[in-house]
Amino acid sequence: MPQAKNNMPLYIIGGILIVYAFIASTDALLPLMKYLKTHKTLDLQVMMGFICGGLALFGAVLNTVRKPGKTVFDRFFLEPLPGILFLLALAMIIRWWAEPMVKIISSQLAPVLGFKIYKVLNLNYVVLGLLVGVLITNTTGIPNFAASGVKCARFVLKMGVILLGARYSFAELAKLGVYSIWLIGFFVLGTVFMVLWLGGLFKQPKSMTGVLSAGMGVCGVSATVAVAPVVKAKSEEMAYTIGTILSFGIICMFIFPTIGHMVGMNAVQFGAWAGTGILNSAQVAAAALAFDAVDIKTLKVAEIFNITRVLFLPIIVLVLATWFGKESGQKLSFKTVVIDKFPIFILGFLLLFIMSSSGLFSPPSHYKGKFIDVSYNDRTRITDQEWETMDKALKDGSIQGLSAAQMAAVVDLVNQRQIAGNFDERDDKKLFDKTGRARMFELEGVLAAEKAKEITLDKDVKGAIKHAVKQVHKKSKTVTTLTDFMIWFFAFGLIGLGMQITKKAIMQAGSWPLIIGCISGVTKAVLSFFVVLWLVKDVVLK
């Protein structure tokens, strides 16, 4: 009977997941899913429910009919299975129910507050998962049956970092000027060394200092997760780093656009400053749009600078591995640092990054698996009804307030029924592509101007332009699949990470991580501001 009692959590989890999958498969939850905007994942929800539920029941039955042992199968499958499925079930709830609800409530409160809470506080699945984990461990505690599975969280996070490499390519560097690459490198390394120095000055643990330096210097959460095993950082130290990054970013979101306008920064200068000084990707995007929602060049430059920091991640891992080894009193050599100590999972990140850069997953010029295709293609055309709407709007002169270039792009869209280069220039692929991209850029500017209420467009006209732009934005199915796995790895891993952060550990931290983070963050923001004004001109993106 004790065996049956131990298996009860698996039976319960399996039963709940299978019942949920069955109900979802009948479309009974479809109206609610459409309200939450998760209906496109219906098939995935059903599949994961049946598979995970089936695994739970299989494990429970297997444990019931056989004696528990210490075999590899027991240690690596049966023992952690209840905890793994428990965390997966929580991740499903957060991804498909909690995060969408937070977004909806935030949007409803926006007219009153003047901003969306989920964007300012970055309440996505990463933060929500971490908070849920912290809440569980500090209230009910980690269930006994889940303890073994929770220990898998760090391994799963490493898998997420590996898959992160597939979202970027060397081609992104080609969009940056020489000054810009040096700027990113200088401030990444400079911030890392500054935090290490401050950590020694304030007598902070080496593990805390190491993980904070990566988070503040490189790319926020991703760097924090990647560097933690190298410097043997504790779960609570990772949480302090993530909290410091998000807190500092919230302040920057409001201050950066105001200062940018006061000193007369152009779109490229502000994008470079935001992409260098603000760490979290969502907050970089929010600051760029707050500065200028019309000229999308601001957002593009900010994101390019932002993702370029990710490319420095392996270098920083190597630097911190060397630093941590010396601080720990180890005798270091090239073999010790590069071969013996360099994390295998970072090599995995590099491998996928190189594969991505070679065009194995999608065209090598992609950004997170997204690329532009402005070639003539019947599938990229706007519909006949959309064409009639656009043609009528042009003839009656209802489209007003556009620049000459924007109006020319709209006229061309009507003439060609799709975004593309000039038909008679199709043999010159480089020129053809350049012309098509220029038209796409102008149409994106029209949509941005409408969003910022600079102009007013008829709903159907706006819909036709959005459809045309959407048609030339392609997604690599391979990168999309790898990204989906990455999201689930992070969702799972960070819930488990949160479950390792206790009240006692939080109380012991004090405010030093936040103080060190703010000193280094403010220093980087101020110095990068002056360097950007000096070096970066309106020529970064051609």
Image (cartoon, rainbow, N blue to C red):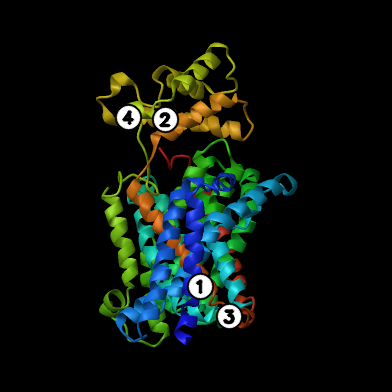
Amino acid type at image mark 1: Leu
Of badges 3 and 4, the one in the foreground is 4
In the rendered image, which quarter is residue 488 located in?
Answer: bottom left
- The residue depicted at 45 percent of the width and 29 percent of the height is 468
Q: Are marks 3 and 4 in contact (CB under 8 Å)?
A: no
Give the Cα separation between the discs numbered 2 and 3: 52 Å
Look at the numbered disc 3 and give the secondary structure of its residue: loop
- The disc label shown at residue 375, or none: 4
471 shown above or below 163: above
- The disc label shown at residue 274, or none: none
Give the Cα separation between the discs numbered 1 and 3: 26 Å
Nearer to us in this view, 275 or 464 = 464
Please report whichever mark, 2 or 3, sits nearer to the chain's N-terminal start. Answer: 3
Question: x and y percent of residue 491 in the render?
Answer: 48, 63
Q: Which residue is mark 3?
A: 202
Amino acid type at image mark 4: Ser
